[in-house]
Image (cartoon, grey):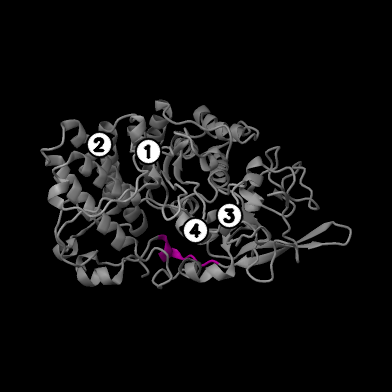
Amino acid sequence: MNRHTTKYTIAILFAGLISFSSCQKDFLDRKPLQLISEETLWQDPKLIELSLNEFYNFQNTGFATAYLPATNTDDLQVIGAEESKISGYLTGNFLVETFPQRNLWKDSYGQIRKMNYFIERAATAPVLSEQQRKEFVAQARFCRAFVYFQLFSNFKDVPLVLKAQLIDEAQDKPLKMNHNEGISFISTELDLAAETLPAAYPTAEIGRITSAAAQAFKSRVLLWAASPLNNVSNDLSAWQKAAESAKKVMDANAFSLQADYNDPFLKKNVLIKPEVILEYRYNGQKSEKQHGYDKNNSPAGYGGRGVNGPTQELVNEYEMKNGKLYNETGSGYDPANPYAGRDPRFEKSILFNTAPFKGRPVETFTKGKDMPTTNASPTGFYTRKFIAEDFDYNKDPNTTSSSNWVILRYAEILLNYAEAQNEFSGPDGTVYQAINDIRKRAKMPELPTGLSQEEMRVKIRHERRIELAFEDQIRYNDLRRWKLATALLNKSVNGVTITKAVNGTFTYAPKIAGGRVFTEKNYWLPIPLVEIGVNPNLKPQNPGW
């Protein structure tokens, strides 16, 4: 928490590029304005509305850095030049300066302070109509709940500060709220937001939080709360609540799966993408909101940097097109041609040796075009998901990518429902339907009938890993909430060395691509020591730190 006395002056900042549905020209696509006085702001409904937009700018985007969030899991391994930036994750030392989340506490409470102030002022501002007041406050409450979920899900127990303060809240030395009560607060806030927010907005306002978006995010929150990390006694009512929350979104018919797996990530210049619920938006305009994902992740032979390399562990999880894993009897897997005949999501997510890309086959064999002598893919694979293949990042070095970072989409809601319902009552027909809808879109066969609850659990967890690969912090938080991180993130990750013979055939040899350390203490982040120094009520520190 910032320890400086401050007087409130509000910057009018346009997130420009955050949206909770898709459109290219909406209320956020404007240039930033200069600072204006607080007195002027609260006399003008339009300026109040614009100040609210700042809160949309504090959402997750995996495109902010060259490495993706999933590099802290067993799905990706970064090139050597990037490893030092995430060494805190790789070594399990979350206290080092290189730990990516080192400012999460400070930044979150700085944003919460602004949100609290806005909520109090907007709730009583006489210049606002009753409808404006309700909608503005509801949007701010959603954004505050979103930030609080980042805090509670990472630090476990944290202070809940809900009043506007002109000086740092640490000086009040607030007590921590326990995790379960914090999640209950977030859930209630999302309910209140959902009750007040509209189902849709006029075209010029598309991108603001809707009632369905608030309910959808609640689905993620309640699934987290019901999982083994937090629901130690396996209280089935927690799973029931999570299932009901996701089902409510499904029954509202506000979102749907798009025709192609890549559509939510790569379709541009459309007003609405029906699968996208939350996303951080980029407009691709020079000197505004851009990112370098396409260049950062294309292989070296295409002028890219190839930062994030999918692991062999992830590759092995992609089924064959007949629904069997590569090592299952009857799969049809050919060791001499290991990437043929896989789940179609494989070739849409991963660049492998011989994959067609930008007019030629990828070459990840030793001395191939895409395996340079320095900073080659450590795994023998490159990421393809999120890359717009027709975007030429070499044509103009000043023009970078404009694809949006998807935070939450409808496929996750279906997966959330399937998991929660299976844990609550077993694999009934609705569980099968949710998973099979996703598999049907991917052109994969339906799940076999007659699965036990445990067998269905394995299938659902597998489907989450494939369908949601590289998205947000999903894999990392899944392994945490399932209490599997100490087993799966506490060992090396692997890749492949490929050799090309003179006759053009390839041989494949396994190799270690990188290491991971994750012990019991890593399930929760340490509370920053400087914050404990200011506020002793933040003790005790999280276990192990």
Mark 1 or 4, nearer chain start: 1
Q: Which mark is residue 372?
A: none
Q: Residue at x 40, y 43 (%)?
A: 220
Element under label 3?
loop
Element under label 4?
helix
Question: Tag 1: residue type?
Answer: Asp
In the picture of the structure, the residue carrying the numbered disc 3 is: 393
Labels 4 & 3 near each other (Cβ < 8 A): no
* Residue 201 higher or lower than 187, as above or below: above
> Viewed as shown, does residue 25 lie left or right of 78?
left
Question: Tag 3: residue type?
Answer: Tyr
- The crowding category of the residue bearing disc 3, from other C-alpha atoms within 10 Å (few below 14, some 14 to 19, many at least 20), is many
Mark 1 or 2, nearer chain start: 1
Q: Residue at x 42, y 68 (%)?
A: 99
In the picture of the structure, the residue carrying the numbered disc 4 is: 485
In the picture of the structure, the residue carrying the numbered disc 1 is: 26
Mark 2 or 3, nearer chain start: 2
> Hey, which quadrant is residue 9 in on the image?
bottom left
